Image: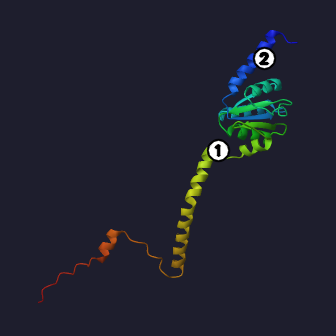
Amino acid sequence: MPSEKILAAKQQRVEELTSALKGATTYVFVATRGLTVAQDTEMRAELRKAGVKFEVIKNTTLRRVFAELGYEGLDEVFQGPTAVGYSDDLIAPAKVLAKYAKDIEPMEIKGGIIDGKVASIDEVIALSQVPDPETLQTQVAYSLLFPFTKLAMLVKAVAEKKQEEGGEAAPVAAPAAETAEAETPAEAPAETPAE
């Protein structure tokens, strides 16, 4: 049986982790067995850049921490070596960790928690495929502008076809000032006296 000192240290570790993990929106659990030092270093650098914290934690500690946080149904996830990537960004942990799990054979996604709900491997992978906010904004802007762009291209194509057929392109409405000028008769040339 562990001494009281060891138990107190373990309890303190659980409390520290509970406090650190409490504010996250997304948690992704992975098995990182088989990563080389270079792969691990590269992955951790990319996670830091994306604002994702990443820790390898003992399963018994993880069970206690997530029980404290109010999550159940993770016993199957906490088998074998487990690391957790977490962030207040909804997509970042899944995006970075799924990329490495795809590229590095022994690494695998084990599950996660997305916005307060325990998520399966498939749900974590689906989340990883959602575009980042900048890409989403670009896609929305493009989809809003596309009908107008298509209309402009269609009008131009019709005008070009009419010109090719020898006809004149449909007149474009002239500004009001030019129209008024065209309707005013030109001044008559001054008459020269008869000789």
Q: Which mark is residue 132?
A: 1
Location of the C terminus by quadrant is bottom left
Q: Nearer the viewer, residue 38 or 57?
A: 57
Q: Nearer the viewer, residue 93 or 167?
A: 93
Classify residue 119 as left or right of residue 194.
Answer: right
Secondary structure of residue under mark 1: loop
Marks 1, 2: nearer the viewer: 2
The residue that appears at 66% across and 47% down in the rendered structure is 131
Quarter that holds the N terminus: top right
Kindly report the distance in space between the C-alpha atoms of the residues bearing marks 1 and 2.
38 Å
Callout 2 crowding tier (Cα within 10 Å): few <14, some 14–19, many ≥20: few
Q: Say above or below: 18 vs 135.
A: above
**Three-letter amino acid code at disc 2?**
Lys
- Residue 187 image offset from top left, x and y in percent: 22, 78
Q: Is residue 191 above or below residue 136?
A: below
Q: Which residue occupies the extreme bottom position in the image? A: 195
Residue 179, given in percent of the width and then of the height, sits at 33, 73
Mark 1 / mark 2, whichever is N-terminal: 2
Q: Residue furthest right?
A: 1
Q: Nearer the viewer, residue 78 or 69?
A: 69
Q: Residue 75 occupies which quadrant of the picture?
A: top right
Q: Position of residue 177 (x, y in %)?
A: 32, 69
Left or right of 182, for residue 147: right
Q: Residue at x 74, y 29 (%)?
A: 70
Depicted 194 relative to depicted 9: above or below: below
What is the quadrant of residue 44 in the picture?
Answer: top right
Residue under pointer 2: 10
